[in-house]
Amino acid sequence: MTAASRYSPKEAIKLLRQVAELLSRRRVFRRRFPAKYGSAQLYVTPECGLRYLRGNLESVDPMLLDLAAELVQPGAVVWDVGANLGLFSFAAAGLAGVDGQIFALEPDTYLVGLLRRSARLKNAHAAPVNVIPCAVADTMSLATFHIVQRARAANYLAGHGASQTGGVRETQRVLTITLDWLATQIPTPDVIKIDVEGADLRVLYGAEELLRAKKPDLVCEVYEAIADDFTAFLSDLGYTLFDGNVPRETRRPISRAVYSTLAISKHKASLHRKSI
């Protein structure tokens, strides 16, 4: 029996992926967005997913970038909660232009370093990206943050996280802040992207005053386990939910949050539907 025959095709692919993930650690590449994102640049690493080996940034997460292009207007203020490498942050920077302001919130110290390297590139036609090294939750505190064995995009606060992490390689102690507090320190947002591996409700609970008063557009990854509470909370605050994977021209309100949820105020939602 050969070594290869010991594994099923599915097991062999999994093994090859694990090897590729290990070999690509600490590899860093500089990428540039297309002109429609202001040709913004950023540093990426396959540690956040092997998809970052691709030279074309638009192919990394097309849905997320489409939503950025739809929501971020020139001069916009954007908060990216769980910024990771800053795919949304730097796309938003190019879309907002030099009059915009982007704030990238990320607790992983390694990724904070890469975000700051990217921010120093000084993209000529893009908004500045301000990197804030912290986690976001419903309280101001110190928390335990897990760096996973597989893609760092799946890093998570203790008590949350997905099942496909491959285990934990490192644990960090991080500061958590609330978005309501942050709104007293920096310009309030027009758009907030939230990707915090299952801790989304804690982020929303700590942002109730901001969401009620400002009604920023929200782009969120919502786990099934919290979908009902997520839906109820935002509905009470006057939001309408949409499936972010559905193209704008065929998009309709949904009654329950899905994994890729777009939430906009009911007033704006009515205008949104009339414009389709």
Image (spheres, rainbow, N blue to C red):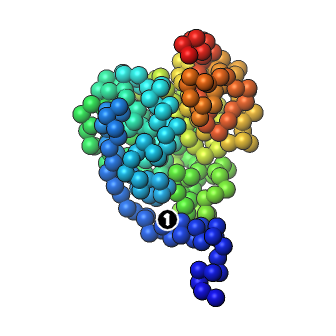
Depicted 50 relative to depicted 216: above or below: below
Type of amino acid under label 1:
Glu
Q: Residues within 10 Å of mark 1 (few under 14, many from 20)?
A: some
Question: Could you tell whether 132 is left or right of 164 in the image?
Answer: left
Depicted 17 relative to depicted 216: above or below: below
Q: Quadrant of the C terminus?
A: top right
- Image quarter for residue 232? top right
Question: Could you tell whether 84 is left or right of 198 in the image?
Answer: left
Question: Between 21 and 82, which is closer to the camera in this rendering?
Answer: 21
Residue 216 in sight: yes
On the image, numbered disc 1 is attached to which residue?
Answer: 21
Residue 185 in sight: no
- Residue 230 in the image: state x and y as whole percent: 69, 32
Question: Between 23 and 15, which is closer to the camera in this rendering?
Answer: 15
Residue ID at (26%, 43%): 121
Q: Secondary structure at mark 1?
A: helix
- Image quarter for residue 75? top left
Q: How many marks?
A: 1
Residue ID at (41%, 22%): 73
- Residue 98 in the image: state x and y as whole percent: 29, 26
